[in-house]
Structures are given as structure tokens and as C-alpha cells.
Amino acid sequence: MKARKSDFPIDEFILNRWSRRAMSQELMTDDELMSLFEAARWAPSSYNAQLWRFIYGKRGTPAFEKLFNILVPANQSWAKNASFLILVISRNNFTYNDNPSRTHSFDTGASCENLALQGFINGFVVHGMEGFDYDKAKVETQVPDGYTVEAMFAIGKPGSPADLPEELRKREVPSDRIPVDTFIFEGTFKK
Ligand SMILES: Cc1cc2nc3c(=O)[nH]c(=O)nc-3n(C[C@H](O)[C@H](O)[C@H](O)COP(=O)(O)O)c2cc1C
């Protein structure tokens, strides 16, 4: 497997985190999941508003089934071995005065990266997903108005790529990135 290489020095866990799909049947413990939510908890947010919310289900429970059933079939084909599925939601307005927050999604993304990095450090698969039915997710998990359904995650113990469907087995490698100088601009946006 080709190792990732950074153009500038960064911590190895940032460089080497990647979204595996192969997961073993072995279940994670609840405490192992809570460690990832704890990492999410300490993310920065505008006004320290902490507008992220998570709905989770453990494999073998009705909560998992409910979340599993809103995934597109392509994601179901590998996420079926996840220990936990998570639906990520954000509250649109501040809790203290109910005024709109501009950054609820941005802050929630930061909490998810904390969760993903901690998951990688702890040796778990943490794989983000947008391949699910957003409307059904809202209804099935009873998300109230005033909240945004953001994404889902499949989390589990690493497994063998040999157990993945063939198409996905070929793609079970770390991806590369566009160079830094294609997305940073000094002073003015450039196309
Ligand atoms: C919000 C979000 C949604 C994603 N949706 C899916 C998805 O539905 N199915 C999937 O297999 N991967 C999905 N991914 C994984 C991305 O394809 C992956 O993060 C990206 O290719 C970069 O690779 P890496 O995470 O291995 O570094 C998603 C990732 C994020 C952050």
C-alpha cells in the first residue's frame, strides 16, 4: 500500500487517518464509543455553543437497524459490519437565546473530525457517509424542526479487505490530496 506523504511537516496521525471500509464482526464496547464522543465534545465552536448532536445505534439493536435502513445500498454493503452507526445533527439556533447560528454546521464538522481522529488513534474504523436518505433520517429518528441532518458515520473494529465486495476491495487504499497551493490564496480569491 502506497504510504501518504505530506509536503510540509504534520503530525502522523493526521496524515495517516483514512476512511477504511473493512470492519470485523467483533463489537466495540460502549466505552470505546464514548471515548470518541468525548473527543467530539472538546471541539472548538463559535461562542462555545456546541450545537452538535449525535444519534447512535449499536449493531444488534433496533436503533442500529433504524439507522442502517436509511443508508443507500452501496453503504449498507460494507457498513453492515459496523459496531455503531451514528447520525450527526446540528442545532440551527443558539440554545441560550435561540438566535440563528451561522456556524452550527462548521462547528459540528470540527467535532466530527475530533471524533474521527480519536477513532483512528484508538485503532478503529471511522467512516463518514452522506449516502443515506436525509428526509427519512429526520422522520425515523424524530429530529425536531430547527435541527439540520448533517452526515452519518460507520464505526467499528478493522477487518479484512478480503471480506469486502470486490468493487470496494480495490478501493480500500488511502487516497491522496490536492496540493496546498491549489486551495490557499494570499489576500484575494483566485480561480
Ligand atoms: C461528510 C462525508 C460524507 C461521506 N460520504 C461517504 C459515503 O456515503 N460513502 C462512502 O463510502 N464514503 C463516504 N465518505 C468518505 C470520503 O469519500 C473520504 O473521506 C474521502 O474520500 C477522503 O478519504 P479518507 O477519509 O480516506 O482520507 C464521506 C466522507 C465525509 C467526510
Image (tube, helix red, strand yellow):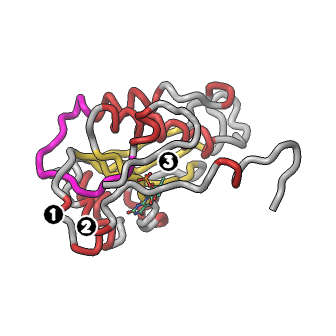
Within-10-Å neighbours for mark 2: few <14, some 14–19, many 20+: some
Numbered label attached to residue 169: 2
Q: In the structure shown, which secondary structural element does the residue marked by tag 2 occupy?
A: helix
The reply to whether dot 2 and dot 1 touch (C-beta < 8 Å) is yes
Image coords of residue 160 (percent x, y)? 16, 56
In front of the other: label 2 or label 3? Answer: 2
Q: In the structure shown, which secondary structural element does the residue marked by tag 1 occupy?
A: helix
Q: Earlier in the sequence, mark 2 or mark 3?
A: 3
Q: Nearer the viewer, residue 170 or 158?
A: 170
Check mark 1 vs ligand 1: CB closer than 8 Å? yes or no. no
Q: Nearer the viewer, residue 155 or 96?
A: 155
Quadrant into which the C terminus falls: bottom right
Q: Point out the stretch of residues depicted in magenta.
A: 18-32
Amino acid under disc 2: Arg
In front of the other: label 3 or label 1? Answer: 1
Determine the CA span between mark 2 and mark 1. Answer: 7 Å
> Which residue position holds label 1?
162
Q: What residue occupies the far right of the structure in this picture?
A: 188
Splitting the image into 4 quarters, where does residue 164 fall?
Answer: bottom left
